[in-house]
Image (cartoon, rainbow, N blue to C red):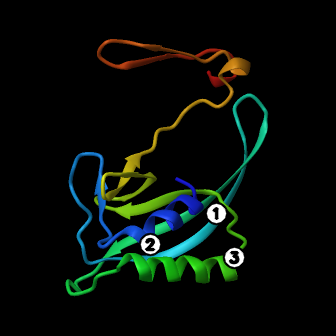
């Protein structure tokens, strides 16, 4: 989900709800403690230089169970972040801690925001000879060339 998409959704929401893919909900007293601009410069295993830019939300729960972040307050936070940071209209990535800090893609389903699990992938499969086959039980990856 891009920043423009969440800004279009927020004015029409009465409650702000985040859920995980497994159906569990982020507690309603969460805080968004950060809105940040992350830029990652890297090289893939095929030798291609890459750059990714994302907008980062950090969701955090505290002992303050009376706290409720509503959609209008989040919209104000986003406008303030846009004034202070060159956010553009990048994709949003959400950090949320359970056993460890997880990073999630963000989508919207029904009346809730959904934290979607992220997966790693070979970005240079055509250059390094990595091929992936779907097995009925699991994903099987055959690696050769530069990935070995």
Q: Secondary structure at mark 1?
A: strand
Residue under label 3: 85
Residue 87 against residue 75 in the figure, above or below: above
Name the residue nearer the viewer: 68 or 96: 68
Residue under label 1: 38
Q: Judge the density around disc 1: few (<14), some (14-19), many (≥20) Cα neighbours within 10 Å.
A: some
Measured in 3D between alpha carbons, the distance from the residue under mark 3 to the one under mark 1, in whole angstroms, is 11 Å
Mark toward the start of the polypeptide (3 vs 1): 1
Q: Judge the density around disc 3: few (<14), some (14-19), many (≥20) Cα neighbours within 10 Å.
A: few
Mark toward the start of the polypeptide (2 vs 1): 2
Residue 144 against residue 73 in the figure, above or below: above
Q: Is residue 100 left or right of residue 8?
A: left
Residue at 22% of width from left, 84% of height from top? Answer: 63
Question: Percent from the top left, x then y, of residue 121?
Answer: 55, 32
Q: Is residue 145 left or right of residue 92?
A: right
Residue under label 2: 11
Measured in 3D between alpha carbons, the distance from the residue under mark 3 to the one under mark 2, in whole angstroms, is 22 Å
Question: Percent from the top left, x then y, of residue 115?
Answer: 37, 53
Name the residue nearer the viewer: 127 or 33: 33
């Amino acid at each position: 989900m891009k920043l423009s998409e969440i800004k279009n959704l927020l004015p029409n929401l009465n409650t702000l709800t985040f859920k995980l893919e497994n159906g569990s909900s982020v507690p309603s007293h969460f805080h968004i403690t950060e809105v940040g601009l992350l830029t990652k410069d890297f090289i893939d295993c095929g030798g291609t230089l890459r750059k990714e830019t994302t907008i980062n939300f950090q969701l955090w729960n505290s002992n303050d169970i009376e706290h409720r972040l509503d959609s209008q307050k989040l919209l104000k936070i986003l406008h303030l972040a846009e004034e202070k940071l060159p956010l553009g209209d990048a994709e949003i990535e959400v950090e949320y801690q359970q056993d460890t800090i997880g990073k999630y893609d963000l989508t919207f389903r029904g009346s809730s925001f959904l934290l979607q699990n992220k997966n790693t992938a070979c970005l240079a499969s055509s250059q390094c000879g990595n091929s992936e086959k779907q097995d009925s039980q699991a994903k099987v990856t055959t690696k050769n060339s530069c990935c070995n």
